[in-house]
Image: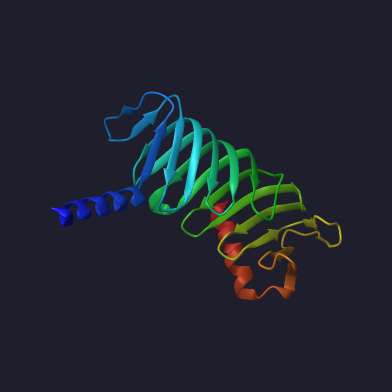
Amino acid sequence: MKRVLLTVFIGSIAFAQAGFVAQPYGDQKVNDDGSITLAQGGIIKDNKHGFSIDAKYIEYKDGVFLRAKTAKLKNNTGQSLASPNINYVIANDRMDIAGALSYSDDNVSGLSATRAIAYPDAKKIVAFSVSGSSPTIKGNAAVFNDATNEAFLYGNYFYKSTDGKVTKERKGDAAMLLVNFSNKNRTTYQADAQIPAAVAKTYIDLINRSR
């Protein structure tokens, strides 16, 4: 009997870790296609990918998609983002985030962008027409790589560290700057040709794929 109960308990944990956990603010409506609408909004937690979305309207189908309006997204590594519309296609590991949006993480705060694409499995966020206040950031596009604790600025970039001691700037659609925050006591910078070609290509390909 104990073994049966243990098996059921483990199975319940696995189920919770595999999909969405909903905390509705009002009624839940089950639609004909099996999706669920939270017309009064609520909180959706994705334990597998380590994030939650708090929104005023949510429609989702576990393992397939999630759409949210007037939404705030947070993950368990410090990234947070607010957007009027979020559309997450799970099979594609792609979350389209409409602007105007705001973004912050452990390294960047007060950042805004016209739109963004998040890749929860890859732990990357691509943002367009970015500007931020701490540190001061501007660029045509940026990639925030949570897996490597890096920020990649692409096109007409400007960067000024929070303490004001470091300023990096270059004009041009192909200008690029890689900022590594891994060492909290010593942020490192690589600009343009200093960035390894393979690394630059990976980021640029991701930006182009996200346009």
Q: Is residue 22 above or below residue 126?
A: above
At a point 56% along the width and 60% down the height, the residue shown is 206
Q: Describe residue 178's horizontal placement relative to residue 84 as left or right.
A: right
Q: Is residue 100 above or below residue 133?
A: above
Q: Answer with the quarter of the image where residue 209 lies.
A: bottom right
At a point 83% along the width and 57% down the height, the residue shown is 163
x, y (%) of residue 27? 37, 23
Q: Describe residue 85's horizontal placement relative to residue 179 as left or right.
A: left
Q: Describe residue 128's horizontal placement relative to residue 12 as left or right.
A: right
Residue sitting farthest toward the left:
1
x, y (%) of residue 181? 68, 64
x, y (%) of residue 106? 65, 54
Camera-nearest residue between 163 and 69 = 163
Residue sitting farthest toward the front:
2
At a point 60% along the width and 69% down the height, the residue shown is 201
Total marks drawn?
Answer: 0
Camera-nearest residue between 93 and 7 = 7
Colour logic: rainbow
x, y (%) of residue 54? 50, 36
